[in-house]
């Protein structure tokens, strides 16, 4: 080539260009080491399902709020279990108003004392236990929300994956329909086909473009739904690999795990908390009491010239629950009704979980059967039908409408296949929530 264009370049110029190119590559390597990829470059990194799960569960606001409420209830339980603060009493007793002073009357004294109240029965212990159990309930509800957030994130990611795959399939099919339109125009130009076929081809091309626009709309909606859980990372492209969720435990095994679902553990904690409320209401029928200890200082002398003695006092105060019976009975009755309501709510929640599990388990198996049918028969049959229709059309043994229907049917079949895989994965996500399957 150099002989054709002119004389050979001098060797030193060739070596100089190679050295400059090596130096430039070294500088670019150093810059890449010192300055990591920008945020825009990171946004192009594919988002896997596992990463989306981690992002959603990290400091999820709703779950953090529930955990904060549980911590607040635990702190209140500590306060409820403590005695009330003692009261300090300071005063001047029996001071003569009309005449005299501190030494005039023998009963005049300066008093200081302490008062400590003791709530009725075991109300402190039962009140603290009730708040501790409510804290456990809130903590279990936080775990249940964590499972729900995980399921919602998986569902949103899988929806976004589906619409991305559907968009790619339709976009990949666009050249095929372009070729069909081109073949139709060629056959029309030589008089072998009618203008109706050309118009039908162009119409299907426009419908394909409209379908792409609609898919992009659905993809934006799915992206926004995923953004609720992971924020800006939802704008990243979705990884092309689906999770390998092909096997699930038996229905009996999943049903056996339902009592350990956080929602059920929360319901059990609610019943125990209401039982503690019953005990608390029963203890309120007992009297509370208080102890007063005081010291009184006196000045002056008796008539015998002996200094007046100081006083020490001890007083025990006991409540007399004479008029409390009706209110105590009403409080106890309300606590019993609340416990009964909590037990009924637990039974309702268990039935709802059992019904959801049975329905989702049947749905997973139906989707698995349909998916197997698509992969063993329908996909190949749709492809063969499309190819046979095109060959028949080219040999003038079939109408153009048959070709378009077969091609569109093959495209729809491939999209339906992706939809089935996504729906089965979403069904597995629900079963994993109910049965507590590991990630």
Image (cartoon, grey):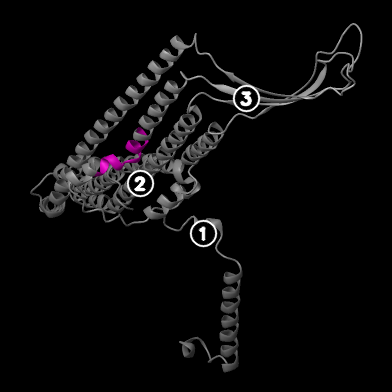
| Residue 365 pos. (x, y %) | 16, 45
Q: CA distance from mark 3 to mark 2?
A: 62 Å
| Residue 204 pos. (x, y %) | 26, 42
- The label shown at residue 291 is 3
Compared to residue 108, the image places residue 365 above or below, namely below
Q: Which residue is depicted at the point 60% across and 66% down? A: 35
Residue 236 relative to residue 295: left or right: left
Q: Nearer the viewer, mark 1 or mark 3?
A: 3
Q: Nearer the viewer, mark 1 or mark 2?
A: 2
Choose between 74 and 382: the one closer to the eye. Answer: 74
- The label shown at residue 41 is 1
Q: Please identify the quarter of the rendering in which residue 261 is found.
A: top left
Q: Would residue 204 be visible to someone looking at this image?
A: no
Residue projecting furthest to the bottom: 11
| Residue 307 pos. (x, y %) | 87, 24
- The label shown at residue 154 is 2
Residue projecting furthest to the right: 100
The crowding category of the residue bearing disc 1, from other C-alpha atoms within 10 Å (few below 14, some 14 to 19, many at least 20), is few
Q: Earlier in the sequence, mark 1 or mark 3?
A: 1
Q: CA distance from mark 1 to mark 2?
A: 24 Å
Q: Is residue 285 magenta?
A: no
| Residue 361 pos. (x, y %) | 20, 42
Q: CA distance from mark 1 to mark 3?
A: 73 Å
- The label shown at residue 114 is none
Q: Nearer the viewer, mark 3 or mark 2?
A: 3
Q: Magenta stretch: give its range.
A: 257-267
């Amino acid at each position: 080539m150099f002989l054709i264009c002119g004389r050979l370049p001098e060797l030193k110029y060739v070596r100089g260009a190679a050295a400059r190119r090596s130096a430039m590559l070294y500088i670019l390597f150093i810059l890449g080491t010192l300055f990591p990829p920008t945020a825009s470059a990171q946004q192009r990194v594919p988002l896997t399902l596992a990463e989306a799960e981690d992002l959603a569960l990290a400091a999820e606001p709703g779950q953090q709020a529930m955990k904060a409420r549980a911590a607040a209830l635990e702190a209140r339980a500590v306060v409820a279990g403590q005695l009330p603060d003692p009261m300090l009493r300071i005063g001047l007793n029996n001071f003569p108003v009309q005449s005299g002073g501190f030494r005039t009357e023998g009963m005049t004294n300066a008093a200081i004392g302490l008062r400590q109240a003791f709530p009725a029965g075991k109300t402190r212990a039962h009140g603290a236990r009730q708040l501790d159990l409510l804290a456990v309930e809130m903590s279990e509800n936080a775990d249940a929300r964590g499972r729900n957030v995980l399921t919602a994130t998986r569902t949103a990611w899988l929806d976004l994956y589906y619409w991305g795959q559907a968009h790619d399939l339709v976009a990949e099919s666009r050249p095929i329909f372009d070729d069909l339109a081109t073949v139709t125009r060629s056959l029309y130009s030589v008089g072998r086909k009618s203008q109706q076929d050309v118009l039908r081809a162009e119409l299907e091309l426009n419908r394909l473009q409209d379908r792409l626009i609609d898919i992009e709309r659905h993809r934006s909606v799915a992206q926004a739904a995923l953004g609720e859980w992971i924020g800006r990372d939802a704008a990243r492209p979705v990884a092309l690999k689906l999770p390998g969720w092909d096997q699930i435990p038996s229905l009996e095994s999943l049903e056996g795990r339902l009592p350990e679902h956080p929602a059920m553990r929360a319901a059990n904690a609610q019943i125990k908390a209401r039982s503690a409320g019953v005990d608390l209401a029963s203890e309120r029928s007992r009297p509370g009491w208080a102890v007063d200890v005081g010291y009184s200082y006196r000045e002056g002398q008796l008539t015998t010239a002996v200094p007046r003695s100081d006083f020490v006092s001890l007083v025990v105060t006991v409540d007399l629950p004479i008029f409390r019976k009706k209110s105590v009975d009403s409080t106890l009755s309300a606590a019993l009704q609340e416990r009964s309501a909590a037990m009924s709510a637990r039974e309702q929640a268990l039935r709802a979980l059992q019904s959801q599990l049975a329905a989702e388990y049947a749905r997973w198996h139906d989707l698995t059967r349909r998916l197997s049918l698509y992969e063993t028969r329908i996909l190949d049959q749709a492809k063969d039908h499309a190819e046979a229709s095109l060959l028949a059309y080219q040999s003038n043994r079939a109408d153009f409408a048959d070709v378009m229907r077969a091609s569109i049917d093959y495209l729809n079949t491939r999209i339906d296949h992706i939809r089935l895989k996504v729906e089965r994965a979403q069904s597995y996500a629900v079963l994993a929530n109910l049965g507590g399957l590991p990630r």
